[in-house]
Image (cartoon, helix red, strand yellow):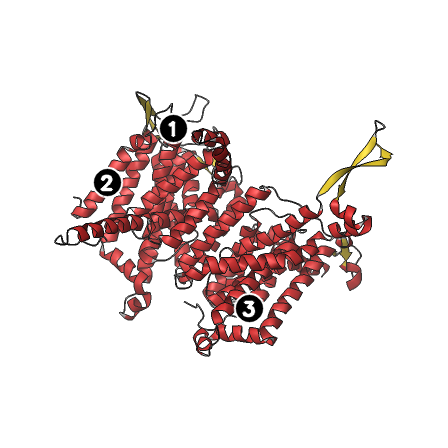
Amino acid sequence: MDAIILQILNGLDKGSAYALIALGLTLIFGTLGVVNFAHGALFMLGAFCAVTLNALFTLSHQVIDPSRTDFLGNPLRVEIPYLVEWFGEATGNAIIDWSVPLSILIAIPVMAAIGLAMERGLIKHFYKRPHADQILVTFGLAIVLQQVVKYFYGANPIPMPAPDAFVGTYDFGVLLGFDPFSIMYPYWRLVYFLFSLVIIAAVFAFLRYTTFGMVVRAGMADRETVGLLGINIGRRFTIMFAIAAIVAGLAGVMYTPIVAPNYNMGMNFLVLSFVVVVVGGMGSLPGAVLAGFMLGILESFASMAAVIDIVPGINQVIIYLVAIVVLLVRPRGLMGRKGVMED
Amino acid sequence: MLGLNKKDTGLFLFVLALIVFAPFILNPFPESSDLARFNAGYPDLMQRFVIFGIFAIGFNILFGLTGYLSFGHAAFLGVGSYAGVWMMKLLTVNIVPALIAAIVVAGIFSLVIGYICLRRSGIYFSILTLAFAQMSFALAYSVLTPITAGETGLQLSLADPRILEAANASGTIPAANFFGLEMRSGFDWAVGDWVFTFNFGYYLCAVFMLIAFYISIRIFRSPFGMMLRAVKSNQQRMGYTGLNSKPYMLAAFVISGMYAGLAGGLMVAVDPLAGADRMFWTASGEVVLMTILGGVGTLLGPVLGAGMIKYFENIFSRLNESDLNALFGFLPDFIQAPLVTVAQMFVGDGWLMTLGLMFMLIVIFLPGGLLEGVQRLGALVSRKKKTNEPSQPAAAPAE
C-alpha cells in the first residue's frame, strides 16, 4: 500500500507539468484551432526567466572585509551580492533564496509579451492554413527559440535552488500511519503540485465565472455567431494565447528546482504533452488536466522495479501505448466532445 | 524513354546529369582559395546527399501525394539500418543481403505500423506515427539493447560469424563491399588547383537513388498515384464513390517505408554503424523539412531539399570563428567584428538556428518549396516578356 501511494505521489509532479502544458495546448487549440508545436519552447522560456532572475539577483562585486584575513594575513576579499549590500544581510539573502518563486512575477509579463508577439507576429497568419503548415512553422519556431537560449545560456543544465524552507523531504509515512521513512516526498514537489492545482483552478475559474471567460467559451463553441453579436472574438482569443503562454511559462519557472533547465527541456515535454492532449481529448480542458495527471502517475507506476521485471522497458513506452490504444478505441479522447477532430 | 513522357525524361536526365557530375558541381572552388571550405565534393557528404535524397523521395510519395504527414518516418530508416548491420554481421560484408534485408524488414515494420496509424487521419495520424517512432527509439535504447547495442550503436566486430564468407585470417574487420568492390574505394583527379574525388560508394548509392527516382516518377504518373492524389483532395468523396482508399494508403505508406529502409541500408553500407539516434523524432522532422524545402508533391523537390539541408548541416556546422574572420577579412574591422559575432550565431553549433529559420521562412513565404519559388520567378520573367511583346502567347502554366 505504501509503495502504491509513493508511486502516485511520484507521478504527481510530472503529471502536474504535463497537465499545465497540455492545458495551454488545449486552450490554444480550442480557441484558435492552431496546433502549437512551440509550446514546449514556451515552457523552456519560462524556466529561463527563473534562471535569468536568479543570475540578476546574485550579481555581486568584491569588497575587502577588514575584519577577516586570508591565509596570507591580508584582508579577505569577499563577493557580496548587490542585493545584500542594498537591503542588508537578512533581506538580501532572503530575496536570493526565494528567487524561483519570485520569478513568477517576472515570468507573467514576459511570457504574456512573448505570447502576444508570437500570436500577432506569426500564428495569426496560419489560421486558414492546413494543420500540417501550423505544425511545421511552430516546429521551426521552437528550434529557433531553443537555439537563441542555447546561444545565451550554453548547452549545459543550470541547476536552480529551491528556497531553503522547501529543501528536504516530507515523511508521508508518519502522516498516513505507515512506517516512518516509507513514503518520503520532497517538499518542493509538493509545492509544485499545489501550485499547478492553483493555476489550473485559476484558469477554470477565469473561464467559468468571468464575462470574458464566458465570451471565450462561447467563441470556442461557435466563433461565427459570437462574432456576429458584435464581439471582437479575435482579440479575446489572442489574449487566451497569451494566457496559455503564461501557464506554460509558470509551469517552467516552478519546475526548475526539480530538473535543472537546459535549452531542450521543452522538447522532451512537448511530445509527451501532445500525447496527453490527444488522450484527454482535443479541445477538452478537463480532459487535458485529467490525462496529464493520469499519464504522469501511470508513468511512475510503470517505472517501479516490480513492474519492469515483468514487462521490461514498459516505463519507456507506457504513455505511447496508452495513446495508441486511446486513439484507436476512442479517437476523440477520454473527454473530447463528439465530432471535434474525430476522423 | 522507359515509359516516361518527354518532360519526365528530361527531368530524369537532369537528375542523372546532376548525380554523375556531382564531384565537379560540388567542388567549384579551387583548393587553395578561402572559399574551398564551401566545397562539398567529398565522398562522405556526397553519399549523404543521395541517401537522404532516397529517404525524402520516399517520404514525398506518402506526404506529397496523400497529404498524410508522418512524423515518425525516421523509425523505418533506423530499422533498416539495424537490419543491414545484422546481415553484415551474420552473413557477409557484401552489401547486397544487407540492402535486401533493410528493405524487407522496414517494409514489414511499416506494414504493421501503417495498418494501425492509417485508421486515423490528420493530426491524429501525425501523433500516432510520432508515438510509434518515439516508442521504437526508447525501446532501441533500453530493452532491445541486445539487438541494437543501445547507446554505443551496432557495429561490426571480428567475432561476427559472417557465415557466407571464407575464414578471415587478416585480423581486421573486412570492409563493406559490393561483390569485391570496396565501398570506400575510389580515386582523386587533380586538375590544376582543383581536386575531384570519385568514390565507388557514392556512385553505387547514386544508382540506387536514380532507380528510386525513376520508380517515384512512375508512381506519380500511374493510376495508383492518381488515386493517392484523390485521397489528398477529398478522402470522403472517394469513400462516397464506393472506393475503399485504405489499401492504397497502406501501399503508399509501405512503399515510403521501404524507401526509408533502403536509405537506412545504404547508410550502413557506406558506414557500418547503426545508432538509435537515427530514429529520434528530430530525424523525422528533418526529412519533413527536406521535402517541404524542395517542394511537397513535386518530383524533383525532395532531392533538391535533401541536398540543401545536408549541405547546410555539414558546411555550416563546420564553420568556426576563424573561418568567418577569413571570409569577411576584406571588410573594414569595425564592420567585420560585429558581423562575425552575428554570423557565429548561425554557424558551427548554431547551424540549427539556420535550419529553424529556414524552416519558418519556407513555410511562411513559400509553402510550395523552392520549386515554387523558381516557378514564381519564371512566371514573373515571362509576364514581363509578355508586356514587352504582347503578340507572344503566354507560357504554358508550369505544373
Q: Are marks 3 and 1 on the same chain?
A: no
**Residue that label 1 marks:** B36
Q: Chain of mark 3?
A: A
Give residue B214's position: percent from left, percent from top: 25, 45
Give residue A310's position: percent from left, percent from top: 59, 53
**Residue that label 3 marks:** A285
Whether residue B92 is visible, yes or no, is no
Q: Is residue B24 above or below residue B353?
A: above
Q: Of circles 2 and 1, which is in front?
A: 1
Residue lying farthest bottom? A229
Marks 2 & 1, CB-CB < 8 Å contact: no
**Residue that label 2 marks:** B14
Residue at x 26% of width, y 40% of height? B15
The crowding category of the residue bearing disc 2, from other C-alpha atoms within 10 Å (few below 14, some 14 to 19, many at least 20), is few
Q: Quadrant of residue B10?
A: top left
Q: Nearer the viewer, residue B92 or B223?
A: B223
Q: Secondary structure at mark 2?
A: helix
Q: Amino acid at mark 1?
A: Ala
In this image, B141 relative to B190: left or right? right
CA–CA distance in space, label 3 to label 2: 53 Å
Of mark 2 and mark 1, the one earlier in the sequence is 2
Q: Secondary structure at mark 1?
A: helix
The crowding category of the residue bearing disc 1, from other C-alpha atoms within 10 Å (few below 14, some 14 to 19, many at least 20), is some
Q: Quadrant of residue A5?
A: bottom right
Q: Chain of mark 1?
A: B
The crowding category of the residue bearing disc 3, from other C-alpha atoms within 10 Å (few below 14, some 14 to 19, many at least 20), is many
Give residue A120's position: percent from left, percent from top: 48, 60
Q: Amino acid at mark 3?
A: Leu
